[in-house]
Image (tube, rainbow, N blue to C red):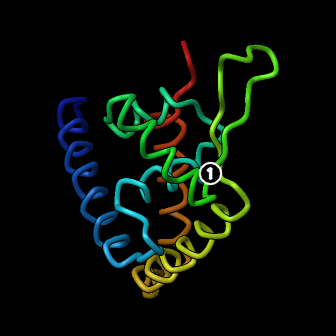
């Protein structure tokens, strides 16, 4: 298979990932949390600690908008900022204990949807899915830095 064919399969895969993510998360209702705030919390849950600029870049948001949303999440006691011991000007953002509990509850619902989706998969298919995720992570999503 040539690289161009793989690329177009990858583009199709990414579109499907977005579609499935929307389907999995559309009914996640967290008290007074907007979809943008949920996306930030989800990113924090899997990538913390992160900087404001990392969140801004990942969410395709301006720094002022990201800062405003983080302020709201901090006021709701869902995330917290800590200063970098090596550079006091740099701040890291992470989930607070309350934020972690909130995301644990949200992920529990997502896990139920995932398990429902794969309920008829054989043990071999589940192993293949896990292997495919490992290969994608190692080679596409988190490749070694050159």
Q: Which residue extends farthest front? A: 75
The quadrant holding residue 88 is: top right
Q: Position of residue 122 (x, y in %)?
A: 49, 81
Q: In this view, does 134 lie to the left or right of 12?
A: right
Depicted 34 relative to depicted 10: above or below = below
- Residue at 25% x, 29% y: name it: 3
Where disc 1 sits, the SS reads strand
Q: In this view, does 51 lie to the left or right of 92?
A: left
- Residue at 34% x, 63% y: name it: 21
| Viewer-proximal residue among 93 and 89 | 89
| Viewer-proximal residue among 125 and 85 | 85
- If the image is split into quadrants, where does the C terminus sit? top right
The quadrant holding residue 20 is: bottom left
Q: Name the residue under label 1.
A: 79
Q: Position of residue 115 (x, y in %)?
A: 49, 81
Q: Is residue 35 left or right of residue 111?
A: left
Depicted 126 relative to depicted 54: above or below = below
Depicted 127 relative to depicted 47: above or below = below
Q: Where is residue 16 in the image (x, y as percent from the top left)?
A: 25, 58
Total marks in image: 1
| Viewer-proximal residue among 142 and 103 | 103
- Residue at 67% x, 62% y: name it: 100
Q: Position of residue 90 (x, y in %)?
A: 65, 20
Q: In this view, does 62 lie to the left or right of 73?
A: left
Mark 1, Cα crowd under 10 Å, few <14 / some 14-19 / many 20+, is: many
């Amino acid at each position: 298979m040539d690289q161009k064919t793989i690329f177009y399969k990858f583009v199709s895969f990414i579109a499907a990932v977005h579609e499935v993510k929307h389907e999995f998360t559309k009914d996640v209702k967290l008290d007074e949390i907007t979809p943008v705030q949920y996306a930030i919390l989800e990113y924090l849950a899997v990538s913390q600690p992160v900087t404001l600029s990392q969140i801004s870049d990942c969410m395709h948001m301006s720094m002022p908008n990201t800062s405003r949303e983080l302020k709201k999440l901090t006021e709701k006691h869902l995330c917290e900022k800590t200063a970098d011991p090596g550079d006091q000007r740099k701040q890291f953002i992470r989930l607070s204990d309350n934020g972690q509990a909130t995301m644990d509850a949200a992920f529990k619902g997502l896990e139920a949807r995932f398990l429902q989706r794969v309920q008829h998969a054989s043990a071999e298919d589940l192993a293949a899915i896990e292997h495919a995720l490992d290969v994608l992570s190692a080679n596409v999503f988190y490749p070694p830095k050159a």
